[in-house]
Amino acid sequence: MIVTRLADAMYSVEHDGRRHIVYVAGPPGDRWAFCEGQVFRANLDVDQTPARRRSGAHAAQVITAPMPATIIRVLVEPGARVRKGDTIVVVEAMKMELPIRASADAVVTAVTCRVGDLVQPDQTLIELE
């Protein structure tokens, strides 16, 4: 993997012969990344120690709002199985729709938002396991 800084908060990431542009925001310890329509958050509250990752145990994942927005579609319900990249919620901010996608194959354990809700950054929308 080759990571090249292009500008403040903008990086080129080359991996397996493919190039991606990644935008990063947030303070140290609470970083957000945006790449190819997906938003990722470094959640340091989740136990992601190497021993846990190697054991095959699944850590709970919290999908949060990336910005102040309005929920316009909720596409999952508790118990649903999702695959990495599936759109699970669609928000609207500044007259633009932003699909929020599953970051891994998982099962939805909780949906904490409804259509029409006004949400703030870091507000939990969906819990996955």
Image: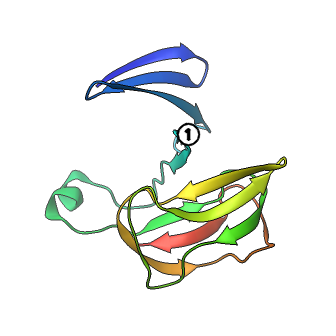
Measuring from the top left, give residue 30's x and y in whole percent. Answer: 55, 45
Q: Residue at x 54, y 76 (%)?
A: 76
Asked whether, in this view, residue 11 is left or right of residue 8, the answer is: left
Looking at the image, the residue that sits furthest to the right is 95
For the N terminus, the image quarter is top left
Residue sitting at the far left: 55
Q: Which amino acid, by three-letter code, is at mark 1?
A: Phe
Image quarter of residue 125: bottom right
Residue 42 image offset from top left, x and y in percent: 48, 48
State which quarter of the image contains the C terminus.
Answer: bottom left
* Residue 86 percent coordinates (x, y): 47, 61
Q: Position of residue 48 (x, y in %)?
A: 32, 56
Around disc 1, counting alpha carbons within 10 Å, would you say few (fewer than 14), some (14 to 19), or many (20 or more)? some
- From the viewer's perspective, is residue 56 above or below residue 15? below
Of the pair 66 and 101, the residue shown nearer to us: 101
Q: What's the colour scheme?
A: rainbow
Q: Secondary structure at mark 1?
A: strand
Depth check: give the residue in front, 68 or 77.
Answer: 77
Please give the count of numbered marks on the rendered protein: 1
Vertical position of residue 126 compared to residue 99: above or below: below
Kindly identify the residue that appears in the image at 61 percent across and 19 percent down.
8
Residue 91 location, quadrant: bottom right
Q: Residue at x 41, y 61 (%)?
A: 46
Q: Is 96 displayed left or right of 35 in the figure?
A: right
Q: Which residue is mark 1?
A: 34
Left or right of 60 in this view: 53:
left
